Image: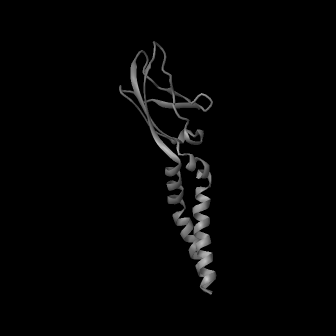
Amino acid sequence: MGKVFLVIAVIVMLFMFLHPIQKGVHDWRTDQITKTVSITTGGGVTIGSVVFTRALFNDDESEITSVGSAIAETPILGTYVPATKTLSLTNLTESQTRVITIVYYAETQDSILMIIGPFLAFLIIGGILGAIAWNAKKGK
């Protein structure tokens, strides 16, 4: 009965800590980048584009955490093209020059984390389960 309780407790604990583990792995695998660029729109033009120096992490637009403009407008994210690292922006005020600031996550430049990064969550959770199993076996 004690081992069943232990297994259930471990499963519950893993689910409780799954999100913090995933967040920690994300933080290890990424660098936060701030890109500032000047965009000028002409008459009747309300779109612009920004070319990133480093690609979005996993080419995922949800890795963009902030978009702001130096003038009174609210830029809206358009599409991201991974091949060119270009993000389009819409809802810009026509006939204006503005400074756009974008904060986003890119994959870390650390070569070790680039190699083991995709496996970190598995290694952490597997290590926890392995330690518990080893301890349970030794405690017999």
Horizontal arrangement in the rendering, residue 32 relative to residue 130 (left or right)? left
Residue 137 is situated, as x and y percent measured from the top left of the image, at 64, 81
Measuring from the top left, give residue 115's x and y in whole percent.
61, 49
- Furthest residue in direction left, as rendered: 71
Residue 33's quadrant in the figure?
top left
The image quadrant where one finds the N terminus is bottom right
Q: Please state the horizontal and vertical placement of residue 133, each as a whole percent of the image.
A: 62, 76
Q: Evaluate whether residue 7 shows in this view.
A: no
- Location of the C terminus (image quadrant): bottom right
Q: Is residue 63 above or below residue 119?
A: above
Q: Residue at x 56, y 41 (%)?
A: 57
Q: Specify the color scheme.
A: one colour
Q: Residue at x 61, y 70 (%)?
A: 129
Tell me where residue 49 appears, x and y as whole percent.
Answer: 51, 24
Examine the image and state in which quarter residue 66 appears.
Answer: top left
Most extreme residue toward the front, as rendered? Answer: 111
Residue 33 visible: yes
Relative height, residue 136 to residue 94 (above, below): below
Total numbered labels: 0
Q: Nearer the viewer, residue 78 or 126?
A: 126
